[in-house]
Amino acid sequence: MQSMRFNLPVRRLFTALMAVCICALIFVSTAFPAFAVSSNPTKGEDKLLGIERKSQEVTLSDPYSREKTQTEANKGINEVQGDADLDKMINPENTTATSVEEQAKNFLEKIAGNDD
């Protein structure tokens, strides 16, 4: 019985200590990514303001014709965003990653023994 009375306070202390550690870990893991950002928070604001201005113009004007919609959409992702941040967009043409199709083809060639 004596050991049981001793273990109960120790167990409660250990549980409380673990709860405090977990709370601290959650706090640190959510707070520090914000501190790790090295760029200026207003750096991307200019592009966003331009996109917002363009979208307001589009909504206030008459609907685009099909030709104008296609012309604007061919500049980038869509007719509103256009070519804003086009250099930062990742697509198959500007990436050096191996596609899933190429990886599967290489894997199947290795299995078949057709290494060139």
Image (cartoon, helix red, strand yellow):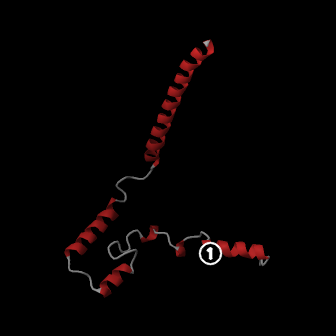
User: Farthest front residue?
Assistant: 1
Residue to which mark 1 is pinned: 101
Q: Is residue 77 left or right of residue 57?
A: right
Extreme residue toward the top, this view: 2
Element assignment for label 1 = helix
Rendering coords of residue 101 (x, y %): 62, 75
* Residue 103 location (% of width, % of height): 66, 71
Query: Where, by quadrant of the figure, is residue 57 drawn?
Result: bottom left
* 97 lies left or right of 65: right
Crowding at mark 1 (Cα within 10 Å: few <14, some 14-19, many 20+): few
**Residue 66 left/right relative to 114:** left
Q: Amino acid at mark 1?
A: Glu
Residue 55: x percent and y percent?
A: 27, 70
- Which residue corresponds to the image point at 48% horizontal and 42% vertical from the top-left? 29
Tell me what residue is drawn at x 43 percent, y 46 percent: 34
Q: Is residue 46 above or below residue 30?
A: below
Q: Nearer the viewer, residue 101 or 89?
A: 101
Viewer-side residue, 20 vs 2: 2
Is residue 92 positioned above or below 47 on the image?
Answer: below
Q: Nearer the viewer, residue 70 or 7?
A: 7
